Amino acid sequence: MGRPREFDVDDALETAMELFWRKGYEGTSLTDLTEGMGITKPSLYGVFGNKEGLFLKALERYERTKMNFFHEALKEPKARDVAEKILRGFADSQTAETGPSGCLGINGALACSEAAAEIQKCLIENRHRGERDLGKRFERAAKEGDLPAGHEPYDLARYIMTISQGTAIQAASGADRSALYRVIDMALQFWPEMAASQN
Amino acid sequence: MGRPREFDVDDALETAMELFWRKGYEGTSLTDLTEGMGITKPSLYGVFGNKEGLFLKALERYERTKMNFFHEALKEPKARDVAEKILRGFADSQTAETGPSGCLGINGALACSEAAAEIQKCLIENRHRGERDLGKRFERAAKEGDLPAGHEPYDLARYIMTISQGTAIQAASGADRSALYRVIDMALQFWPEMAASQN
DNA sequence: CGAATTATATACCGATCGGTATAAAAAGTT
DNA sequence: AACTTTTTATACCGATCGGTATATAATTCG
């Protein structure tokens, strides 16, 4: 019952996500959001709570729709394939023709005022979580004899995430996908294709 | 003649640089700046023009005092030493105990509103310039037979800059220097120490 | 001592920030 | 039709944004 909503919540959230992705949390004003989403401020606040709530919902959508490759990659049987799928997955997302360049998790609030400190903290934790998940996957690989000699799992995880964060800056600076792929090729060069697990 | 200035311009600029470094261009308000620098707005505008002028002067100071290792590194006789000095130089600067974490050139304006578009563009050009300078150095190395086989100079330059930009995000996320050093060790693993130039 | 010059402090400017109060509009329920 | 519920549109809120006008304080020159 009640008056029916005149806009699609999912479409509006998609637009908000793209705006935050392109302009960052603080760089995106409520006017940017309401004009882009085609709704008024009371509608926005009615559905999403406030700007911070909207960002968090947009981030959740981003993780669900753009970062889904990450947890898929963790399922690869060989650690090197995990690493490569993650690197190329990030590069693909960062250079998609539709949608902004770079990464929402980094563009969102890398350096900001105290007003955005909570968002910044949330994004940092997001990065740590990804790195930790990858480290755990590499711990398994170490037990399986599936890591290159002389490397710690969590160091490898940090390495892979560092490359991906670097490509995010590169993409935000105008680098195209093929350029990032060449970077990734170099980053993986030290990591030999390994024989089948021998545990 | 005239009333003498009551503050040290260099000290004030140093403070402004650190504020922009930590909070970004848009995240740093004039109140942050005047309170931090210990001067009033008319004084700030009298000496530095406006917020954008102040940022550009702070960036210039940053390049001069924090990025000086970069052009020093280009003078290394061996390309691998150039790469390593640059990587460790960035990591050192990004994790200095005094001063903010990360990189002013990235924290300053990665994603922002239209109001900061000019600053953003300037920082992107800054990154391109560094990459180009390194690429030129590697071109020379290629002629000298000083590059690992199968690598293009400008791809190598992008690779090195991507790692450094990645460590900037890592540092901004709390990673310490030793963690970044381990990343750098891995990043350079594919690049063998080469015999003396044979041209 | 003036006069000229520069820097300071205070108070203010219009614009925009995120957020909301109020009331009308559009639906279902009875 | 009347009542209830939800969403809409409009207008507004105090706070802060970057930037400046005005006047006073502090110096050198004559």
Image (cartoon, coloured by chain):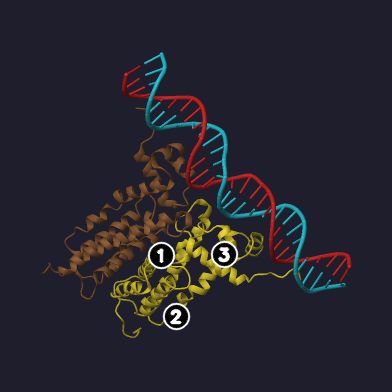
Chain colours: A yellow, B brown, C cyan, D red
Task: Specify the amino acid type for callout 1.
Answer: Ala
How far, Cα to Cα, is label 1 from label 2?
Answer: 29 Å
- In the picture of the structure, the residue carrying the numbered disc 2 is A75
The residue at 32%/58% (across/down) is B91
Dot 2: chain letter: A
How far, Cα to Cα, is label 2 from label 3?
Answer: 37 Å
Where residue A109 sits in the image (x, y, percent)? 48, 59
- Which quarter of the rendered picture does the C terminus of chain A lie within? bottom left
Dot 1: chain letter: A
| Disc on the earlier residue, 2 or 3 | 3
Where residue A146 sits in the image (x, y, percent)? 35, 79
Answer above or below: position of B56 versus B7: below
Q: Are marks 1 and 3 on the same chain?
A: yes
| Disc on the earlier residue, 1 or 2 | 2
Task: Specify the amino acid type for callout 3.
Answer: Gly
Where residue D25 sits in the image (x, y, percent)? 45, 24
The label number, if any, that marks residue A36 in the structure image: 3
Q: Nearer the viewer, mark 2 or mark 3?
A: 3
Say which of B128 and B164 sits in front. Answer: B128
Q: Quadrant of residue C13?
A: top right
Task: Specify the amino acid type for callout 2.
Answer: Lys
Q: Quadrant of residue B128?
A: bottom left
Q: Nearer the viewer, mark 1 or mark 3?
A: 3
Disc 1 to disc 3: CB gap under 8 Å: no
**Circle 1: element type:** helix
The label number, if any, that marks residue A7 in the structure image: none
The label number, if any, that marks residue A172 in the structure image: 1
Q: Quadrant of residue A14?
A: bottom right
The residue at 41%/54% (across/down) is B119
* Label 2 crowd (10 A; few <14 / some 14-19 / many >=20): few
